[in-house]
Image (cartoon, helix red, strand yellow):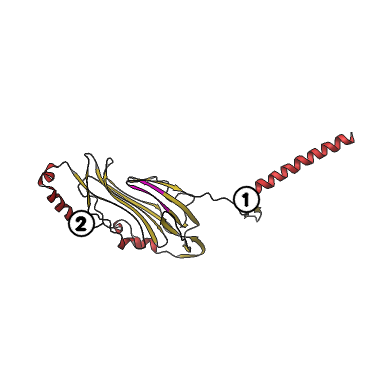
Amino acid sequence: MGTPRIQYLLILLVLGPSLLTSGLELYCQKGLAMTVEADPANMFNWTTEEVEICDKGALCQETVLMIKAGTETAILAMKGCIPDGEEAITIVQHSPHPGLIVISYSNYCEDSFCNDKDSLSQFWEFSETTASTMSTTLHCPTCVALGTCFNAPSLLCPNGTTRCYQGTLEITGGGIESSVEVKGCTATIGCRLMSGILAVGPMFVREVCPRQLLTQPRKTENGATCLPIPVWGVTATVAIAAAINYSLFLKRQFWAWV
């Protein structure tokens, strides 16, 4: 992805004067990127040399979804025409720092080459997301990857986080069909890394988290042991069976005495 708006004016001149004077065509930057970067503010270039001519009534759009875990950020970005919608710029911080951070940006606009953002730092201050005091107690497996994390080191969590998150964002639409596995520290409760938002520009996002089954006993506030549900179920079944057997025993003893 790589050149500024002036080059697109040259492209229009090459295409011919009739296209410039017709006033009917909408030209948009076109591009698609899916990557994981350790330094997205400096390493990710969001321009493109491709041009798309939109149908009548369409808009230009540029959309990006960024998921940061530890020192790495997954980026899913697109530019092009969108057949319908309204002019708007939308920035959402779905999962705030400290810990895992998810930010989305979308721009719908109606002028030729208006989808010309070239840097993510224009709407995300990366320095603000990296400065935090680390905890000394909570550790979580931490990773973000297109597809599957093959290595998730256990890292110290920032102060303010309370739990470990594990989930997958399944993303479709706008030419993208991919999944992003995410693990890390968070203060968000449940499977809500996207804060319940299912659409980001042309992209649809489905968040999937594994069920966390209770398998170990826990201590209640008064010190009593709370048995896990499967164990409680077995214990209850045994107790009920014992009660039934004892009742039958009493009945047999009663009729034998009579």
Query: Considering only vertical position in the picture, is 60 above or below 161?
Result: above
Judged from the image, the secondary structure of the residue bearing numbered disc 1 is: loop
Examine the structure image and report whether residue 174 is included in the region drawn in magenta.
Answer: yes
Tell me where residue 131 appears, x and y as whole percent. Answer: 39, 64
| Residue farthest along the left direction in this orientation | 17
Residue situated in front as seen by the camera: 48 or 244? 48
| Residue type beneath disc 2 | Pro
Give left or right: position of 47 versus 223: left
* Residue, disc 2: 4
Task: Identify which residue is drawn at 82% across, 36% down.
Answer: 251
Give the number of the disc on residue 175: none
Tell me where residue 253 appears, x and y as whole percent. Answer: 85, 38
Kindly indicate the quadrant of the structure image that contains residue 118.
Answer: bottom left
Give left or right: position of 94 versus 31: right
Task: Identify which residue is drawn at 79% across, 38% down.
Answer: 248
| Residue farthest along the right direction in this orientation | 257
Residue situated in front as seen by the camera: 180 or 63? 180
Give left or right: position of 104 versus 244: left
Q: Which residues are magenta?
A: 170-180
Query: Considering only vertical position in the picture, is 249 above or below 98?
Result: above
| Residue type beneath disc 1 | Pro
Tell me where residue 113 appears, x and y as whole percent. Answer: 21, 50
Judged from the image, the secondary structure of the residue bearing numbered disc 2 is: loop
* Residue, disc 1: 228
Examine the structure image and report whether residue 139 is included in the region drawn in magenta.
Answer: no
